[in-house]
Amino acid sequence: MASTLCRVIQFHTHHFFSSPAVLFRRNKAGMMYCTMKSTQSPDATRELKMPQAKVAPDNYRKLDKVTEGFEAVIGLETHVQLNTVTKAFCSCPYSYGSQPNTNICPVCMGLPGALPVLNAKVIECAVKLGLALNCKLAFASKFDRKQYFYPDLPKGYQISQFDIPIATGGYIDVDLPLEFGGGHRRFGITRAHMEEDAGKLLHTGNSSFSQVDLNRAGVPLLEIVSEPDMRTGVEAAEYAAEIQRLVRYLGISNGNMQEGSLRCDVNVSVRPIGQLEFGTKVEVKNLNAFSAIGRAVDYEISRQSLLYSKGQGDEVVQETRLWDEGSQKTVTMRKKEGLADYRYFPEPDLPEVILTEGYVEKIRQSLPEIPEAKRRRYEEMGLGMQDVLFLANDISVANFFDTTVAKGVDVKLAANWIMGDIAAYMKDEKVSIGEIKLTPDELAELIKSIKDGTISGKIGKEILFELIAKGGTVKGLIKEKDLVQITDAGEIEKMVDQVISENPKQVEQYRGGRTKLQGFFAGQVMKMSKGKANPAILNSILLEKLNSSS
Amino acid sequence: MNNLLIPSSTALRVGTRALLRLSSTSAANSNRIWIGRSAFRTQSPARIRKLTRDFCSRSVPDVRRLAETARITLTPEEIEEVGPKIQQVLDWFGQLQAVDLENVEPAIRADTEGDNLRDDVPEVFENREAIIAAIPSYEEPYIKVPKVLNKE
């Protein structure tokens, strides 16, 4: 229920915030610490530019004052929408953005007599994720019905897993962004289970009606519940970013937050340092970007800490709050009246989900390298942490890098090309690495051609952009444009002689002590050679000529 | 009995729907009997019997409250009418408690031979028009429902 309401609100948050007076009646003073402006770019472009979850660092200095003496306890519930072709319990195809109410059938519409049949692919995805999260798998798990009332749920219950989830007791390893001091963390995973998604509700205008689109009803989800192991907004945001990385590496979801394929709810409580029991837990929803997770968590920590430090701890109540991106605050959505009662009971229409050792083993063997393993491997290859985090952030960038390096080129050079000019091009043109025309093979060829002196680094850079934009091969371009580096000392000497004879005035100045003019001569020779002269040979000949007072 | 466990097919029938809510209206323990096999396994048979007995031998059901949790509106006459019916079913369940289940594994569902899975192959339901036509309030392309924002 809770997650459904959140979804509903994402579309029309303004509805809740239409009355500013109610926003912060409870706590005026707390706000002053939290009105910092977001310095973040929109999340859509963030993914390529910034490899790690971002939270404005200056939030922290301000937070320090209020939160001193307190410790936050944070846990996340993450819903991952699987990228199966069909829904979880019926054969309806699902694709984001379809015409509303077109991907429906009696099963996902909850019509009488219709019976669910589980999509085998959902189990496969769950097992993959369970293994990648180092979980213990339940070889016999089951589905349960979770009852709640909302128009996005045609059956009146959600098929989920309650007391026997498919995966329990795992962990995930995370590297914190360097701009927040870096560091490695391991966060516990309580459980991961299979369930179905609900439809979408739209609340338009002031009409007393809402619109329902049931295309998404019955689409498979994996819900991942973390242990309350996080202590800061950065940790929470990076945990979520790592889950996204992981599901993309595993190929089980596109992990897209904007489309709602990855949804995070965060539980935050604060307690005085040294206290064993947890403080009152507040749930925050409507977090549509990693940056929002970090900022919402930090906002909550300061809000709750301030109330506790003012002796108003009883004002921290168990409730659901919404993150409002506009005001950079959380606001009350609803107070919890006791625990929600979903009246779970076993789904009688579905058999137990039985896994065999052989099945699990086969999937284990087929698992790709997970992000953590990749980062550690890159580290061992001798790359710096900045490079490691950038390259491993995006599975397609990592694959590009791996393929390039497999061609036997220098690791650091490959990393530099990808993180430098190639990343800059992708950022400017807003394209992914899969969309550029340059292939890893040609990047490797380019690096080799520079290393063996066939072309200069300068020329290499020039043709790189052509390779990225138009494609082609390094060898082809070198031949076509006659770019082979001139390493013949005699040929270079001729050009040096010509430049010296054409610039007697500069020669005089040079010999008079203005040795900086060497650069001028080198530039002239380079120009004459159309950039092809080998710089080392050029300079040594040039120096010799200029310094010999003939 | 079957109706109790499959609310989807009988969702609009007041009596059965309200019955489902019974488990939530009073004794906290009563929920356990729906939790499933593992809950049964961890409980002693005697304990299970007691839980089930508690569930069934409860005093007269509060129909008004049941209706509220089931999100249905009942007229005073209907409340009058439904109350004894629910009590009847409860009494019937009370009788079932007499059966000795000491050595019987709880049955959650009818056992099927092997798993019943399907491949991830799409199949468009061809009679969508009939589904749409059966929706009480539809405004192309959306289903229209009363605004229920923030009401739980």
Image (spheres, rainbow, N blue to C red):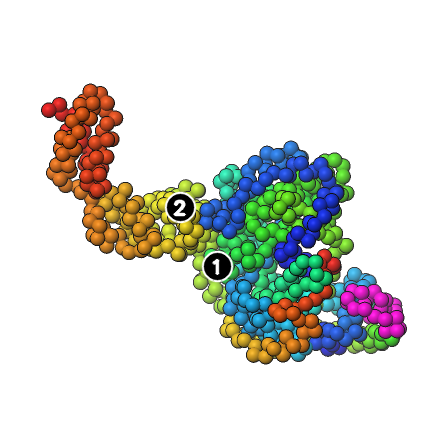
Side of A364 where A515 appears, left or right: left
Q: Which residue appears at 41% of the width and 44% of the height? A: A387
Q: Residue at x 70, y 76 (%)?
A: B9
Q: Nearer the viewer, residue A384 or A262?
A: A262
**Mark before the other along the chain sequence, 2 or 1:** 1
- Inter-mark Cα distance, 2 to 1: 27 Å
**Residue B131 occupies quadrant:** bottom right
Judge whether residue A87 is colored magenta. Answer: no
Q: Chain of mark 2?
A: A
Tell me whether the residue at label 2 lies in contact with that at label 1, contact meaning CB atoms closer than 8 angstroms.
no
Give the structural element (helix, strand or loop) at label 2.
Answer: helix
Can residue A406 be seen by looking at this rendering?
no
For badge 2, the amino acid type reads: Ala
Q: Does residue B77 show up magenta in the picture?
A: yes
Image quarter where the N terminus of chain A lies is: bottom right
Rendering coords of residue A92 (x, y %): 56, 72
Residue found 57% across the figure and 77% down from its top: B125
For disc 2, the marked residue is A424
- Identify the mark at residue A250; answer none if there is no mark: 1
Q: Quadrant of residue B2?
A: bottom right
